[in-house]
Image (cartoon, rainbow, N blue to C red):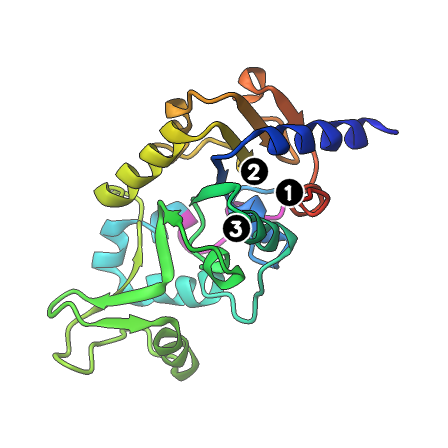
Amino acid sequence: MDEIDEKVKRLQEMVDESERIVFFGGAGVSTESGVPDFRGQDGLYKEHYKYPPETILSHSFYMSNREEFFRFYYDKILVEGVQPNKAHLKLSEMERAGRLSAVVTQNIDGLHQKAGSRRVYELHGTVMRNYCRTCGACYDLDFMLDQKKKGCLDPRCPVCGGEIKPDVVLYEEGLDNDTVSGAVRAIEEADMLIIGGTSLVVYPAAGLIDYFRGRHLVVINLQATDRDKFADLVIESRIGEVLDRIHV
């Protein structure tokens, strides 16, 4: 039995001992579905555009240069045809089995819900919801994909003509208070916290794990994180491959 096998065996034991597991995940959870990682070796932050991605995905840039914002958003954020992977599916299975109490995610792709997870706290919002900044009318992903197909770089509300904005948290914007409160409460009440597929460098989201006071803290990530030294178990491997080996 190699080192990974030993660690997966220990992870299984921790899962078996726990009743209120919370999963805290980031971009690495969805890369196995083909969603690009912002900070990985081949992520968006390594590519070159007229403006840096951090600038384009900021509130001030959205307000001042909507066309360039939506050109990037359509090209790099609205990834079509992606499906949940083994990690999403296992977490959904764990929730149905009554072992997982919540998913807290930094991702905006909606794949956890697509896999069947019901209690999901999306810290950075979701591409699945879009709203008119004038009248508040809501539009789904299909509406935005249609705008993308038409090449519309200034999507407008069919009701009032107002600007439509994706319900995602841009740089310079604060997290939703209700979402943060729900995530904090779930983490506080958890007896096991599994952190997966995240570098834990994006704040304030990464700071929420400080609220964990439970029994088992596990980190599953391809690269080391600053929180590894506090974990009871660290597995440097793909999150989907690890979770797929867990039985509930």
Q: Is disc 1 in contact with disc 3, using a CB cutoff of under 8 Å? A: no
Give the residue number, with chain letter if any, for mark 2. Answer: 196
Q: Is disc 2 in contact with disc 3, using a CB cutoff of under 8 Å? A: no
* In magenta segment, residue 17: no
The residue located at (88%, 29%) in the rendering is 1
Query: Mostly what secondary structure, the magenta segment?
Result: loop
CA distance separating discs 2 and 3: 20 Å
Residue 188 falls left or right of residue 245 = left
Magenta span covers which residues? Answer: 42-53
Instruction: Return the disc, 1 or 2, that comes first in the chain's sequence.
Output: 2
CA distance separating discs 1 and 2: 6 Å
SS assignment at label 2: strand
Q: Residue 83 got which mark?
A: none
SS assignment at label 1: helix
Marks counted in the figure total 3
x, y percent for residue 239: 64, 42
Give the residue number, with chain letter if any, for mark 1. Answer: 239
Residue 118 falls left or right of residue 215 = left
x, y percent for residue 165: 26, 64
Q: Residue 226: in sight, yes or no?
A: no
The residue located at (44%, 30%) in the rendering is 190
Q: Which of marks 1 and 3 is in front?
A: 1
Q: Is disc 1 in contact with disc 2, using a CB cutoff of under 8 Å? A: yes
Give the residue number, with chain letter if any, for mark 3. Answer: 44
Q: State the image quarter where residue 154 is shown.
A: bottom left
Instruction: Return the disc, 2 or 3, that comes first in the chain's sequence.
Output: 3
Q: State the image quarter where residue 127 is shown.
A: bottom left
